[in-house]
Amino acid sequence: MTSLTLFERIIARDIPATVVYEDDKFIAIKDIAPKAPTHLLVIPKKVSTRIDEIVDPSEMGELWLTAIKVAREQLGDYRLVVNVGKGGGQEVPHTHIHILGGWEGPVPY
């Protein structure tokens, strides 16, 4: 039996999270270990381990458009980041996009 990912448990409301957006396909939450003044995660409810496993162009497009929508609602300027695989910095094996922003001055990296 496969265990649920952290994000599946958040989607199922088994683990609390601060939800900033949700629809039938995606959820966006505040990151619990932020790397920026505002750090959100946009997570598809349909599970894929890594973004490069998504082969349907419409699914990929919907994911990016949702991330942009949430970023525009929450921030003026923002950065979208995707980590792919452990070697790419991905910590949770469930596709997600990071929204980072809210810096007052120059971005620290």
Image (tube, rainbow, N blue to C red):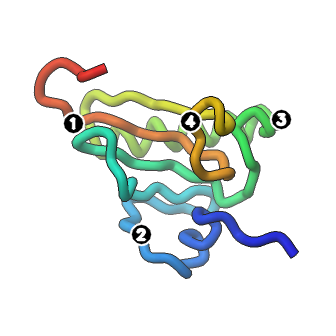
Q: Which residue is mark 3?
A: 55
Label 4 vs 2, first from the N-terminus: 2
Which of label 2 and label 3 is nearer to you? 2
Q: Residue type at mark 4? A: Gly
Relative image position of residue 82 (x, y in whole percent): 56, 33
Q: Check the image and name the residue furthest to the right.
A: 1
| Residue 45, horizontal then vertical, whole percent | 66, 60
Distance from Cα at disc 4 to Cα at disc 3:
22 Å
User: Percent x, y for residue 87?
Assistant: 65, 31
Give whichever of 101, 36 is nearer the camera: 36
Circle 4 sits on which residue? 89
Q: CA distance from mark 1 to mark 4?
A: 22 Å
Q: Position of residue 108 (x, y in %)?
A: 24, 22
Instruction: Measure the alpha-carbon separation of dots 1 and 3.
Output: 32 Å
Provide the residue designation for mark 2. Answer: 17
Q: Residue 12, located in which quarter of the rendered image?
A: bottom right
Which residue is denoted by mark 1 in the rendering? 102
The amino acid on which the numbered mark 1 sits, given as a three-letter code, is: Gly
* Label 2 to label 3: alpha-carbon separation: 29 Å
Neighbour tally class for label 2: few under 14, some 14-19, many 20 plus, Cα within 10 Å? some
Q: Are marks 1 and 2 in contact (CB under 8 Å)?
A: no
Secondary structure beneath dot 2 equals loop
Residue drawn at x 28%, y 34% as measured from the top left? 101
Earlier in the chain: of badge 1 and badge 3, it is: 3
